[in-house]
Image (tube, rainbow, N blue to C red):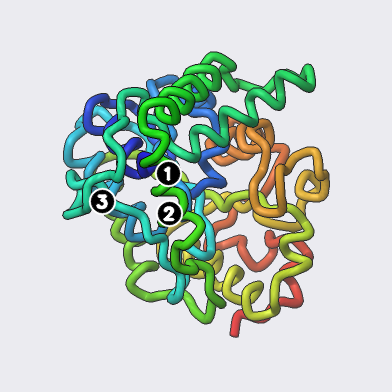
Amino acid sequence: MVDERIAKFEVLSKRRFGAYLLGSSRTAMIPGAALAQLTGVSAYNASFSSATAEEYAQYVSYILRTNPNVRHIVIGLDLFAFSDTFRSYGNMPAGLRDSTPPPLTFLPEQFSLSEFWRSVLVLMFNLRGLEPEMTIASDGERHYAAYEKALAEEGDALRAHIEQEVLRGPVRWQKITKIDEGRFRKLREISEACARAGVQLTLFTNPLFVEYWQDASAPELRLYRQLLERTVREVGPIHDFSVGYELNRDPANFFNKSHFSPKLGVRALANALGARSDYGRRLTAENIENSLPPVWHDVPLR
């Protein structure tokens, strides 16, 4: 199957947007149409699974270098993106750095695993008779058709790729021991580059289901609070949706412990961009000590 990084970059290299959303498979759940509606400019969700801070920086650098009309860059942050042990094993597009070509030749629909997952979710919404906020059913139908075409035309290669890269792929998730200084520096570089270009940078933490934090270790909680603390003191404000909010306790807002629904994602995005003020908290260097949810009060920084 076509690597989603390459598929998304194909779109970025051929079209220019006024706003971009970057992040992991969590952020990928937010429809790009929501960002367009909230900013009033054309928008694209360029998020992909397991995105790291280096990848944020590579994409932002490319966007700023090639698109003088960009106005907004929004990034949904995850702790693992800054971990010293996490590796995404993603194939970066040749337009960003040297990379091996995708294992399949099928590219016309910009199909990727993350888009197929989103398409299935759209179908689930439709079958349940629900109205997915700002989610366009035709997108799901188009991507599902692309999947069927890929399976029909390159089924053997598709199965071989999944067997090698997915089922037998190396383990990516390891115990997070510390925030990698090189990766955190990338976030500062992104902020400085956006400021020089006159681009509005908005940072937020992805919503996580309450059980995710109940299962988290004390060191992981400590590192997450460190990430929040360092971001507001060394980079700038961040809107936090990670834990401690009533909406994070409702299973209807999540597909699993670490992936929220498109509807909750749109609500978080609206709050991060200032269009709403009914979810999460905007953290700054001045208010972080008093504005963190109670769950963080007993989590030490060291």
Residue 264, percent across and down? 68, 36
| Rendered position, 213 above or below 76 | below
* SS assignment at label 1: strand
Q: Is residue 81 left or right of residue 245?
A: left
Q: Is residue 156 left or right of residue 96?
A: right
Give the CA distance from mark 3 to mark 1.
Answer: 15 Å
User: Is there any visible trace of residue 199 in the rendered image?
Assistant: yes
Q: Nearer the viewer, mark 3 or mark 2?
A: 2
Q: Which residue is mark 3?
A: 193
| Rendered position, 146 above or below 164 | above
Between 163 and 43, the one nearer to me in the picture? 163
The amino acid on which the numbered mark 2 sits, given as a three-letter code, is Ala
Q: Quadrant of residue 224?
A: bottom right
The amino acid on which the numbered mark 3 sits, given as a three-letter code, is Ala
Labelled disc at residue 51: 2
| Rendered position, 47 above or below 164 | above
Q: Is residue 144 left or right of residue 62?
A: right
Q: Quadrant of residue 131?
A: top right
Labelled disc at residue 22: 1
Give the CA distance from mark 2 to mark 1.
Answer: 9 Å
Q: Residue at x 76, y 77 (%)?
A: 298
Q: Residues within 10 Å of mark 2 (few under 14, many from 20)?
A: many
